[in-house]
Image: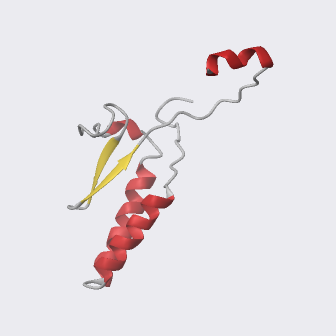
Amino acid sequence: MDSQNKRHIVVISDEATQMLVSHARFLAQVSEQAALKLIEAFQEKARSLEQFPERNPWLTDTLLPAGKYRKLLLGQRYLLVYQIKEAPFMWTLTRQDYAWLL
């Protein structure tokens, strides 16, 4: 499969979901339409990361490890921060393999 057709799995953390709900709830007090627009924009941007998530720049902040998180602008005021992780591999460990963990 070439990289153009490769699909990544986007996992949205519970914390990110709660933040989105909180911001949308606050925004809905002013405009329900704006709150729905924020949620739709978030879903669209998150879905867009399924293909080519590397397209966005690194998030640079002295408090965060360099080269770990990427950023994607969401609307004019929100920043979608994400991390790309490779798919986990299945490993079979035997007793003598444990030394590298120490």
- Indicate the position of residue 29 as horizontal and vertical percent values: 29, 85
The furthest residue to the left: 76
Identity of the residue drawn at 44% across and 66% down: 18
Image location (x, y in percent) of residue 56: 31, 40
Given the current orientation, which residue lies at the most extreme front position? Answer: 102
Q: Position of residue 74 (x, y in %)?
A: 29, 58
Report which quarter residue 24 is drawn in: bottom left
* Residue 82 percent across, percent down from the top left: 39, 46
Most distant residue in the right direction: 95
Query: Residue drawn at (71%, 26%), measured in percent from left and top?
Result: 91
Q: Is residue 73 above or below residue 69?
A: below
Q: Quadrant of the N terminus?
A: top right
Please state the total of marks drawn on the protein image: 0
Between 52 and 9, the one lying in front of the other is: 9
**Quarter that holds the C terminus:** top right
Q: Is residue 31 left or right of residue 50?
A: left
Query: Quick check: 24 above or below 69?
Result: below
Determine which quarter of the picture holds residue 17: bottom left
**Quarter of the image where one finds residue 22:** bottom left
**Left or right of residue 24: residue 62:** left
The residue at the point 41 percent across, 39 percent down is: 52
Against 37, residue 100 (above or below) is: above
Q: Nearer the viewer, residue 69 or 40?
A: 69
